[in-house]
Amino acid sequence: MKRLFFSIYFVLTCLILQAQDKIAPKYSNEFLQIGVGADALGRSNAVVASIEGVNAGYWNPAGLLTSSKFLEVGAMHSEYFAGIAKYDYLGLSKVIDRPGTMHDNAALGLSMIRFAVDDIPNTTQLIDNEGRIDYDRITTFTASDFALILSYANKNLPIEGLSGGVNFKIIRRKVGDFSKAWGFGIDAGIQYQKNENLRFGLMLRDVTSTFNAWIFDLDDEMREVFVKTGNELPQNGLELTLPRLIAGVQYKKELGTKGIYALGEIDLPFTFDGKRNTLIKSKAISIDPNIGVEIGFKTYFCVRIGVGNFQEIKEFDDSKKMTFQPNAGFGVSIKNFTVDYAFTDLGDNSIALYSHVISLKAKLNKPKNAKR
């Protein structure tokens, strides 16, 4: 059985590498790289080793195994490009406790993400058959990306302190009535608690590549516009999102005996689709480090800072400089409710647009009248 699995995986990998130049663009399904939760964004996404709770379904499913409550809920809304693009997230997670079974210490998660630009003007029919401009012929459409992530995590592993999890992703992308795509993919992650201070995390996104099957539906009138304007007619086809590896290490230290703590994490996201504009790059592999720090008092309050998105920018005089994106934020918890805030691109230091992000988390107790 193992030989069959590795044979299938080897064949798929060869096919993916062979088709990479044709159907695997460098930037694919990028809406799934933005991130969820203002707590993570405030630390510049350096959370793979330390993430816990409901948002771990997105970052690293191995971190779902932390809640002692009946259900956890997470939600976030943010806007980009002066409110033109809207990003929404809703997550649910539940720990399963069935002694004597394979689900003795396991968790399930559900994450839903939508990234969309609404009310885009469609000017392909602006000019009527007589060559006159008619603004009444302008319509609008929506370009939206939607992802449903189903997560499962388990601690029943042979190494003490090691937990693992997997994600199954369903992706729906749509541009008006012109094009649409369905996609499917798998993520896998682990976390290892070496001691009370040191933790490691590893997340492999799109393990076997995520497949998006695109279908274009252009009417005759729109096809004619494409031809007359010299644009290439889009063709139905397959788009691949290549694997991405994120390795992280977190160190946490109690500062005295009054509940004050400090933690820091460094994450190294590896991409394998050629040279990117990152801090560390080669023809085959690129690495974009993320660094995050958090200082807090017990579970009640914390402040966060982070830095990432290192890029080399070329100036008008052909000189080059390195830019980076500093983020900051804080979190407040009252009983079972947490509010997190993040301000991305502090001081407008990088080419990325800044954004204010607020997210919520709630831990819900089991209803008293619920059946066992």
Image (tube, rainbow, N blue to C red):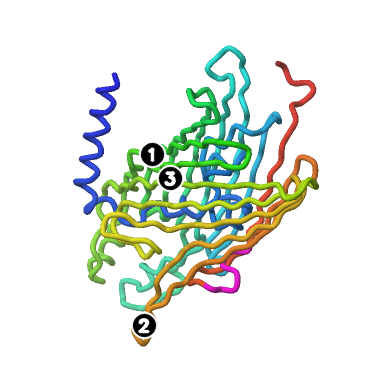
Q: Residue 84 versus residue 307: which sits nearer the camera? A: 307
Q: Amino acid at mark 2?
A: Ser
Image height of 313 relative to 37, above or below = below
What separation in Å lies between label 2 and label 1 (alpha carbons)?
A: 43 Å
Location of mark 3 (residue): 172
Residue 331 shows up from this direction: no
The percent position of residue 39, horizontal first and vertical second, equals 63, 52
Dot 1 alpha-carbon crowd within 10 angstroms: few under 14, some 14 to 19, many 20 or more: some
Give the residue furthest to the left.
Answer: 18
Q: Nearer the viewer, mark 2 or mark 1?
A: 2
The quarter of the displayed image where residue 132 is located: bottom left
Q: What crowding class fits label 3: few (fewer than 14 Cα within 10 Å), some (14-19), or many (20 or more)?
A: some
Q: Which residues are magenta?
A: 343-349
According to the picture, the residue beneath numbered tag 1 turns out to be 184
* Residue sitting at x 63%, y 38%: 196
Residue 199 % position (x, y)? 55, 41
332 in relation to 193, above or below: below
Front of the two marks 1 and 3: 1
Q: Secondary structure at mark 3?
A: strand
